[in-house]
Image (cartoon, grey):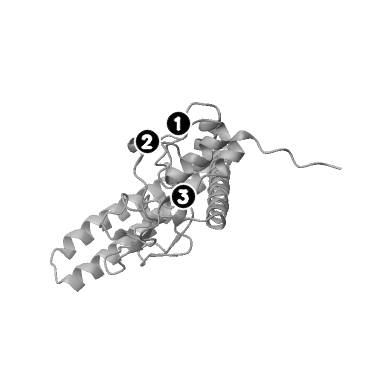
Amino acid sequence: MSSTPAPTLADRIENLLPQTQCTKCGYPACRPYAEAVADGTAGYNQCPPGGAEGVARIAAVLGKPVIPLNPVNGVERPRPLAVIDETLCIGCTLCIQACPVDAIVGAAKQMHTVINDLCTGCDLCVAPCPVDCIAMVDVTPGKTGWDAWSQPQADAARERHQFRVARLRREKEENDARLAAKAAAKLKAVEAESTLSPEEKAAADRKKAIIQAAMERARLKKEQMAAQAAGTTGIDDVSRSVKKQIEEISEKLEQQKDPQ
């Protein structure tokens, strides 16, 4: 029968943090801060969301005296909630990327909104917003630190953060795999082309030239339509220029057909 391993000191300290993932402690998330406190490289009074009670809880686990919250890391305050002014939001997605618990939803160039029950009030979405459409609103007036938070909320926030970290890691691995496959395919195509006979290479070059000529004709048509819509002049000049390019390509094709 396997037994559950006893929680480490870092585990115990992490369980005493409100899991806002706000980075105010100076670490990228609550877990790294807990590990730093456990190994003695960080003070146990650097978590503003936990407030004075949070310091006291960690001090009890460490067997150390209760000390004031370090003002360098911030001040104890009511729990805030991010609110997006949807009339100003431009859909840049920067706030979505910044949210450590996936509490903001929306799509590129579409309005974003905050899922109130998921927001930890970390403030991390405010700075990246280029139009200043995000405000932090206190939702627990008169209650600060752990009085403004609960253990179930902290546990849920930690779970969402862990899920987000795993998702981002998976997406990066999938993207890296796609890039590697694309590079491998390109290398394979280059290797295949290097083994072509002169006749096959000439045929491939002719095919490329034909495609390029077709693309030039399409571009010409698009420019003509745009110019006509705008009521501009000089279409004939553009036409002659592009036609000359097509004629040069056609001439090269004929030379490839008859090298003499």
For marks 2 and 1, give the CA distance.
Answer: 9 Å
For marks 3 and 2, give the CA distance.
Answer: 17 Å
For marks 3 and 1, give the CA distance.
Answer: 18 Å
Which three-letter amino acid code belongs to the residue tagged 2? Asn
Q: Is residue 65 visible?
A: yes
Residue sitting farthest toward the top = 40
Instruction: Tell me where residue 21 appears, x and y as whole percent.
Output: 46, 47
Badge nearest the viewer, 3 or 2: 2
Which three-letter amino acid code belongs to the residue tagged 3? Thr
Residue 12 position (above or below residue 132)? above
Which three-letter amino acid code belongs to the residue tagged 1? Gly
Label number found at residue 20: 3
Name the one closer to the observer, 170 or 139: 139
Assign a secondary structure to mark 3.
Answer: loop
Residue sitting farthest toward the front = 65
The part of the image, by quadrant, that contains residue 131 is bottom left
> Is there CB contact under 8 Å for labels 3 and 2?
no
Label number found at residue 43: 1
Residue at 53 percent of width and 53 percent of height? 154
Mark 2 sits on what residue? 70
Instruction: Tell me where residue 243 appears, x and y as whole percent.
Output: 27, 58
The part of the image, by quadrant, that contains residue 26 is top left
Instruction: Tell me where residue 153 appears, x and y as whole percent.
Output: 53, 57
Disc 3 crowd, CA 10 A, few/some/many (<14, 14-19, 20+)? many
Query: Dividing the image into 4 quarters, which one contains the C terminus?
Result: top left
| Earlier sequence position, callout 2 versus callout 1 | 1
Disc 2 crowd, CA 10 A, few/some/many (<14, 14-19, 20+)? some
Residue at 38 percent of width and 65 percent of height? 112
| Earlier sequence position, callout 3 versus callout 1 | 3
Name the one closer to the observer, 97 or 190: 97
> Is there CB contact under 8 Å for labels 2 and 1?
yes
